[in-house]
Image: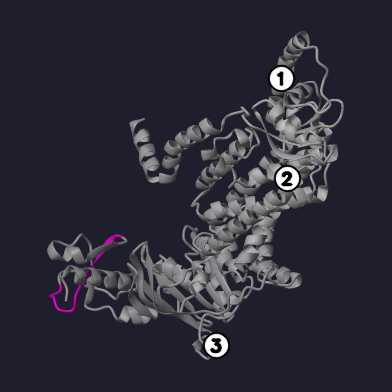
Amino acid sequence: MWAMILKEFRQLRRDRRTLAMMILMPVLLLVVLGYAASFDVSSIAVAASGPQASTVAGALPRTFHVVAAENTQGRGWAQDQLRDGNAVVAVVTGGARPVVLIDGTQLFAARAALTALAGQAAQSGQARSGQAAQSGQAAQSEPGTSQVALQTAASQVHVLYNPKLATSDIMIPGLAGVVLVFIGTIITSLGVVRERQSGTLEQLAVMPLRSRDVFLGKITPYFAVAAADLAIVLVVGVAIFGVPFRGSLLVFGLGALLFLFVTLGIGVLISSVSQNQGQAIQLAVMTLLPQVLLSGLIFPLSSIVAGVRWIAYLLPLTYFNEISRGVMLRAEPIGALWQPFLYLTLLGAVIVTLASLRFRRYLAPARSRRAA
Amino acid sequence: MTGRPDGPVTSPGTRADTGDWGTDEISVLYQGRLALDKITLRAVAGQLTAVVGGDGAGKTTLLRCLAGVLAPASGHVRRPPARQIGYLSAGSGTYPDLTVQENLDFRASAYGLSSVQAREQSGDLLGRAGLDAARDRLAGQLSGGMRQKLGVIAAMLTSPRLLVLDEPTTGVDPVSRSGLWWLIARAAADGCAVVLATTYLDEAERAAAVLALDDGRELAAGTPDQIIAAVPGTLRSVAGRPPGSDEQRAWRRGGRWRVWDPPQPASGAGQPIQPDLQDAVTVAALARELRLAGSLR
């Protein structure tokens, strides 16, 4: 047994990447998760519309902060703010009682908003009884801040897009992204490394194929399989879990296409720096874990500490989540999704360029540095 | 998806146009070490050139440069366009999870062969290699010898002008080796310039030209006869391990010992013999070693 232990230690010592991962990964994960793992929502973005929009800010509990207020706009504008992801809560004033709209796709923020509003309603109920007993005065025609607060507490609350606040409704669009990451990153990186391990990479290097052809030829089948997987996940999500698909299939497809391109690029990039399939899996897992944990799939982005949150903005799944949830649940149009589309495109351009350059060197050093 | 720039890696109007490929004084650095030191190799159309040497001599590196997998740090490589090169890397270079026929189909498609050409060529080569019955078997399920044969015929599929084979017969049983040699000899007879690396010096004797490498340096080059004729001093065959200073110039061959005497020293006991290629390369390596150690001028 001693011989075996010694041999394993020697092998482990030489496999520096595995060793580093075994030691650093738990520390890294603990630190990142420690800061990221929070369902607490401390700030809820609010859009207010209607004649008393400007007074809403002072009427809401502290957790809420108004990001947009339009005295001349009505419910349509307020609803658009939620649909486009600009706010989690919209308060529409002007009626007998304000209407509070909550975006149910922001699950934890929506729950926090409901809890806060319920708390405020309870407090207002007590305050109203006290006020009536003391003064017995009639309500003014132009209510002040305290009165808006009372009215807001007594408002009608509507949860939009995910009225039951169902977890599956928000998880499945995100899980579709995880499936794509899995296929795109892990399977692709393994497929490319297998060429090196089986000794066929050298054959490809001398064949009359351009690096670009090998690159595209290699990723296209994975692309097709991942696209089929995505379709299956969507059909299962809609048919079995009852997840709505309210938006444009075309916009969703475009987002998925971009996202898939990025993940396949990451897969090729990983394979080009891996000597064997074991190393490729390790690296792929290192890219997969942060995407699952930090992309907003599980923990709300707003709950992640700012010092760690910036990592989320480097992860393609963060943007795909925004697109898939936006399109599927809120029917968000492409115009409102320009930011995730733009960032995904930028990420794709950087990663795919790096991947193809690395792949070219990986495939045939002689091509990049021809014999004189 | 074919169409990689096909320009030959050589200047126009050179010997390459006539099928005279090879390397001119190429050097390769690998992990800070000189893996090849100014190596020149000629690969002539219709001729088989063997690159011999022990493990780590630089055979694979040289062949990789010739095939275009690796770029030398200095020197010049003359090779035809990629479409006209057939290359078998160390190992069979075939996909274990594709059938024999699928492996050949992929190769044919990558080289832009028409389906008719591909069928004809692969049928012919499978027949010659005795792999007809195995065409629907997965390459990973073939025996080592059959897999090597598949690798060789895959490299020959496009009727290349330059065929580069890295140890095609290593680990192959004698019967399969003979079959492989027949295939390789046919390619040379059809006008292809064949360069193969081997550790078997008896095989190398069949080549028209031999380049012996040792530690990335040229040890000997020429036809087998030229290399044998260039052996300096004399070679003796003795029954037992030679005593004293002779021991450092001796090696076992079969049941007897060979002792090499440099040109000057007096001969010891034993019967003088005519060296073969194996002896010649061994003497060249020994002479170099002794020269480096300072015991031979």
Left or right: residue A22 compared with residue B157: left
Residue A264 seen in the current view = yes
> What is the C-alpha distance between the residues marked 2 and 1?
33 Å
Residue A253 seen in the current view = no
Amino acid type assigned to the residue bearing label 2 in the image: Ile
Residue matched to label 1? A120
- The numbered dot on residue A262 is none
Please tell me whether residue A364 is drawn above or below residue A84 in the rendered image: below
Question: Residue B275 location, x and y as percent?
Answer: 30, 74
Amino acid type assigned to the residue bearing label 3 in the image: Asp
Residue matched to label 3? B17
Residue matched to label 2? A323
Does dot 3 land on a helix, a strand or a loop? helix
> What is the C-alpha distance between the residues marked 3 and 2?
58 Å
Chain of the residue on which disc 2 is drawn: A
Nearer to us: label 3 or label 2: 2
Does dot 1 land on a helix, a strand or a loop? helix
Name the residue at the bottom extreme: B13
Same subunit: marks 1 and 3? no
Q: Which residue is drawn at 44% across and 73% down?
A: B50
Does dot 2 land on a helix, a strand or a loop? helix
Q: Does the magenta stretch include residue B263?
A: yes
Please tell me whether residue A237 is drawn above or below residue A193 in the rendered image: above
Which quarter of the figure is the N terminus of chain A placed in?
top left
Same subunit: marks 3 and 2? no
Chain of the residue on which disc 3 is drawn: B
Residue nearest the observer in this picture, B263 or A240: A240
Residue nearest the observer in this picture, B81 or B186: B81
The magenta stretch spans which residues? B255-267
